[in-house]
Image (spheres, rainbow, N blue to C red):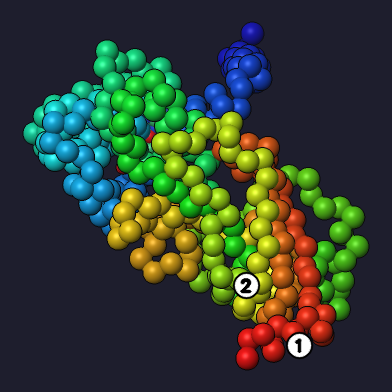
Amino acid sequence: MSLHTLRRLGARVLSAVSRLFRRTLSPAERYREFNGRYFSDFYEQERMLADKPRMEFYRAAIQRHIQPGDRVIDLGTGTGILAALASRRGAAKVYAIDHSSILDTARTLAQANRIERVEFIDTHSTELSLSERVDVIVHEQMGDCLFDEAMVANVCDLRDRLLKPDGLILPSRFEFYCEPVKIRDQRHVPFIWELEVHGYDYAVLERQRPQEPTYYQVRSSDLSLVEHFLTEAAPALTIDLHTVNESALPPEVTFTRTVVHAGRLDGYAIYFRVLVDDDLRLSSGPLDPGRAPHWGFRILRTDRDDFAVGDTITVSLKVGSWSEVSSWRWSHVKRTPSRTERVNETSRAT
Ligand SMILES: C[S@@+](CC[C@H](N)C(=O)[O-])C[C@H]1O[C@@H](n2cnc3c(N)ncnc32)[C@H](O)[C@@H]1O
């Protein structure tokens, strides 16, 4: 058999084994494998570390809420930065865990920076066992869409098994936003069936709407994309990791708001805010000054709809699983108030 044939055979066997392997992994296991690889090199870590609002938020949160003598788990330590801040704050012991090979880098850095009382553990959090419960779990497990790095499942699992009953999760309070948005005209890309280019009409393609969920989402960190929100921003969902459970997250969120900025509805901007104290917050919102720049935001695209001030929009977001954005489905209903309703509204306001 020639070398060429042998190679081709080898490649086929390898690909068959890898297909078999992929089939036997659950979506959660596949994500876990992806996450471990994603965070293993310097590129992702340096983007997070260079994000000044993010790092200042965590420095202040640790300085305020970790007490000297505390025992701490740093869930997903990455390069070990939060473990180092906790140790310098006086934590008696920090268990710094990560399932990615970046943990070797964390060990090197801790040694070079003379960080003490940190034990690095190479494990996935769900497999961590300790002989004691801790005072604090510190973590940064927020994905662009808040839930898409399995934050709720991972933190709640550690909370239930390894946090003291009065222990602290840092951070714990989150607001999830799903804001009706208008994209700047020069950046707006309509669905293909909404286009007419020099008299060439694409409407017939509406029958062939793609099935892939990714077609209906735009990932971006480009702040020039968003022109304005149509309504006043308000959280679609708030959670506190001290009390929430993954199974208690609602399968659907629905809200009705009045339009305050007229314009074309192009989609919903998905982003989050993290709250530690009234004066200590972190945001990934595209219109928030001082937003943490390394997080992107997501636009869930909608069919074109034009809104006037005073119209109401009812948005419904249904989720198969909060941690799998491809399982999310959304829709909206527009309502334009009648003349009488508008007159009554005006007279109430005067
Ligand atoms: C967003 S990075 C944060 C890194 C670091 N804490 C920081 O603030 O710069 C998340 C890290 O958590 C790790 N990670 C994610 N899920 C994990 C899990 N369930 N168990 C252990 N490590 C995990 C990833 O490998 C990654 O290094």
Query: Residue 226 is drawn in which quadrant?
Result: bottom right
Numbered mark located on residue 291 in the image:
none
- Which quadrant is home to the C terminus? bottom right
Callout 2 secondary element = loop
Q: Residue 115 placed where, x, y %?
A: 12, 33
Residue at x-position 21% and y-position 28%: 71
Label 1 amino acid?
Val
Q: Is residue 11 visible?
A: no
The residue at 52%/32% (across/down) is 245
Front tag of 2 and 1: 1
In the rendered image, residue 228, in percent from the top left (x then y), is placed at 57, 74
At label 1, counting other C-alpha atoms closer than 10 Å, the crowd grade (few under 14, some 14-19, many 20 or more) is few
On the rendered structure, is 113 left or right of 57?
left
Judging by the rendered image, the residue that carries numbered circle 2 is 230
Image quadrant of ligand 1 equals: top left
- The answer to whether any part of residue 25 appears in the image is yes
Out of 38 and 3, give the one closest to the viewer: 38
Say which amino acid is labelled 2: Leu
Q: Residue 232 appears in which quarter of the rendering?
A: bottom right
Eyeballing the image, is 82 above or below 69? below
Q: Which residue is mark 1?
A: 343
Disc 1 Cβ-to-ligand 1 distance below 8 Å: no
Place of residue 332 in the rendered image (x, y in percent of width and height, measured from the top left): 75, 60
Q: How many angstroms separate mark 2 from mark 1 (CA)? A: 22 Å
Residue for point 26% across, 48% down: 61
Q: Is residue 62 left or right of residue 188?
A: left
Tell me the quadrant of the picture where the N terminus can be found. Answer: top right
Q: Is residue 71 left or right of residue 126?
A: left
Number of numbered callouts drawn = 2
Residue at 21% of width from left, 23% of height from top?
Answer: 119
Q: Is residue 301 above or below residue 146?
A: below
Helix, strand or loop at label 1? It is helix
